Amino acid sequence: MSTAALLGGTPVADFASQKPTLASGAALSRQLLVEAFDAGLWDDWPGTGSQADVFATEFAEFNGARRCALVTNGTHTLQLALEALDVGFGDEVIVPALTWQATASVVCDVNAVPILVDVDPQTMAIDPARVREAITERTRAVIPVHLYHRMADMDAILSICDEQGIACIEDAAHAHGSTWRDRHAGSMGRLGSFSFQRSKLMNCGEGGALITSDEQLFDRVMSLRNCGRTSPSGVKVHSGNYRLTALQAAVLRGELDALRKNADELDRRGRLLDDQIQNAPGVTPLFRSPNLTRQCSYGYAFLFDESAFDGLAAGVFRRALSAELGVGFGTCYEPLNQSPYYFPQEKRRHQLGDAYVAAIDPSRFDLPVAEKLWKHRVVQAHWPLFQLDPGDASLVGDAIQKVFENRQQLRQAA
């Protein structure tokens, strides 16, 4: 048995030094960025034929939606989606326990109440059974999040929404290019929200997009993103400025071109990693539904079993695996009831009465599945494992096997 790298042994690999092997859109982005600069059409004013106009059309078509509105970032896309649906004070919106805080914060920002529900222990996505239990006469919408390496169960979510007459807003910030029954992430709900923040599969530094096939909702979004100006079809909604720039859109056109080339390969590489995890001791890949027809993953995650490692703590396993492969492995987002970034009850703008402050306090929610995943089970790569040459996927399995063989020594050292 070779000594674990965390205990002074030789690492299995140094992934951080490896160059990406996926197609890049950088050259096209650079070309289009110069064209946008030279054209002088730097803003995102509708109907000018700018790079923003072109990208909005391309992104809608790629996702199988009729319309796309470009927005400043992924947080604002969710906010405008809620405002387009006229969600506000007195309403409730169901969101998953595991997500970036923005998914819930935007609900507070429209003066509604986020209802935090637990997640499926095999996928980390929102649990449809918990959604059904949380619905009240005040429920107006559900925001399923396609998290890290899996999509939410859209068959179940859409069935509940149709049955109860509530809206589905898909948070697809982690899922550009993923498909469920060959329908693109973001295209199945009333509105689909995307982020183009620097860590995402498509990146222009910051930015977002809303897609929809509902023309009335699209018109409301177009007014909402454009300072409340009248939309092309005459809709006008009081709002502020949430427009993207044409310079960012030029970058995104190159990013979309790369995603078109990489999408199927991302799915293939994800399956190869799943196979390695399936065959390694004490770990399990996230459940992949047969309905998930293409997985373009944001971050690779899998599940760890402390008991199979004779009580080795998940935190020690993550550090040991990081040392073996030269890149960081951590856990998932904190559950929102314990997140250091989500405390809306303390913000002055949300002091709308004692009852409202109590309703938005995340500590009132019990989220045991999410808490167990966060503390003890989830292992998530902080580096895009999908950039690996497919032939190197086996090194992940080798590293886990090595940590397993050193589990007693690692326990003693910890």
Image (cartoon, helix red, strand yellow):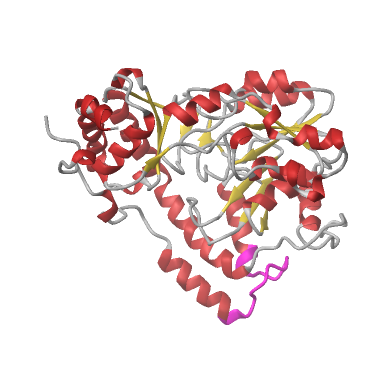
Q: Residue 55 in the image: state x and y as whole percent.
A: 59, 60
Q: Is residue 355 visible?
A: yes
Q: Is residue 344 above or below residue 27?
A: above
Q: In front here: 310 or 121?
A: 310
Q: Is residue 26 left or right of residue 62?
A: left
Q: Residue 205 in the image: state x and y as whole percent.
A: 53, 62
Q: Residue at x 34, y 52 (%)?
A: 22
Q: Is residue 66 visible?
A: no
Q: Residue 388 in the image: state x and y as whole percent.
A: 29, 47
Q: Is residue 414 above or below residue 251?
A: above
Q: How many marks?
A: 0
Q: Residue at x 55, y 49 (%)?
A: 62
Membership of 48 in magenta stretch: yes
Q: Quadrant of residue 50?
A: bottom right
Image: magenta residue range: 38-53
Report the magenta stretch's main SS: loop
Q: Residue at x 61, y 45 (%)?
A: 341
Membership of 331 in magenta stretch: no
Q: Residue 349 in the image: state x and y as whole percent.
A: 81, 50
- The quarter in which the C terminus is drawn is top left
Q: Quadrant of residue 369?
A: top right
- The quarter in which the N terminus is drawn is top left
Q: In front here: 28 or 410?
A: 410
Q: Is residue 288 above or below residue 54?
A: above
